[in-house]
Image: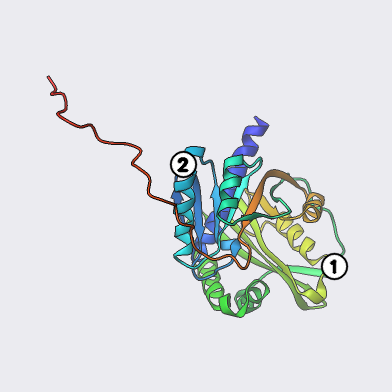
Amino acid sequence: MVDELTELATEAALEAERQFVLTLGGFALEIPGATLVTHEKIPVPRFNFVQEMGVGPERQTAFFERALDHYFQRALRPTFRVPEPVPNHVASGLLRFGFRPRSELLRLLLSTGAGPAKFGKEIEVRVADRSDLDLVASFWTGPSERAEFRTAMDVAWSHPNPHERLAPLVALLHGEPIASALVYRYRTSAGIHAVATQPSARGKGAASELVAFALEHQPVGTGVRYSMFADSARLESHLEHLGFRRAREFRVFELPPDAVLAIPPPGPPQPPQWRPPRGRTARRE
């Protein structure tokens, strides 16, 4: 029963993450074997990824061509998230199209309900207000994406759809903002996203304070299970001290910076794999 509940919570967390991208102006296209999460106006891997859910060896060529064509037509560089262990045919297919695996696994962690570790009171955390919109957007986006991100965040924050809620958080040191995070809830799952600290203030525990505040004060309401992604063993270790445990891990494949956004030619024409029957068909009685 425990494993089944964890599996349901894991799927809910993955769905909540997709909804987080959608509510900020993106969209998701489902094709056999995967979901293509896309945000054309914020062209970063965090908002443009393929969530692989199972592709058979006999269908991988059509799958890869369809997925890549979707992103390349939009001049986007997607990443592929493939659950561990990665099937050999999926890995070889991605390598053939120029993708390379990251050295670190991407891990999805779920909160266990245990109380987070206590930290010092030097850093203050609060839920942001509307006057903090520009500040929160500046922590996570560059100048080219900031206006789009700010507008989308304002809409999701001020006018949420049913079953969702967004709560930006701000961490302050001596009254000065040094870090920020977004807590997004979809139904009974809530993800802590976009945790970012100013470079000059790193190492002071602001990111941990933001996560601990979310778990303790539940700014998006009660009755939810929190999740976070960790892209390094070091970050996973920090989150374990805050009451998180690994639920699933993925190998992330990405294109090198110099890769050309084009699908290789399929090779010489091949005869059709299926031919319609010739001659008369049997007449039904």
Quarter of the figure that contains the N terminus: top right
Q: Amino acid at mark 2?
A: Arg
| Foreground residue among 103 and 247 | 103
Quick check: 265 left or right of 197?
left
- Residue 14 lies, in percent from the top left, at 58, 49
Q: Amino acid at mark 1?
A: Gly
- Residue 86 lies, in percent from the top left, at 63, 42
In the current view of this chain or complex, which residue is farthest to the top?
A: 285
| Residue visible at 72% across and 55% down in the picture | 231
Within 10 Å of the Cα at label 1, are there few (<14), some (14-19), or many (20+) other Cα atoms? few
Q: Is residue 5 above or below residue 192?
A: above
Q: Which residue is mark 2?
A: 59
| Residue visible at 81% across and 76% down in the picture | 200
Q: Is residue 26 above or below residue 136?
A: above
Q: Nearer the viewer, mark 2 or mark 1?
A: 2
Q: Which type of secondary structure does the marked residue at label 2 adopt?
A: helix
Q: Which type of secondary structure does the marked residue at label 1 adopt?
A: loop
Between discs 2 and 1, the one toward the N terminus? 2
Q: CA distance from mark 2 to mark 1?
A: 47 Å
| Foreground residue among 56 and 246 | 56
Quick check: 93 left or right of 218?
left
Any mark on residue 88, and which? none
| Residue visible at 38% across and 45% down in the picture | 270
| Foreground residue among 52 and 167 | 52
Q: Is residue 118 above or below residue 195?
A: above
- Residue 33 lies, in percent from the top left, at 49, 44
Residue 187 visible = no
Residue 51 visible = yes
Quarter of the figure that contains the C terminus: top left
| Residue visible at 20% across and 32% down in the picture | 278
Any mark on residue 203, and which? 1
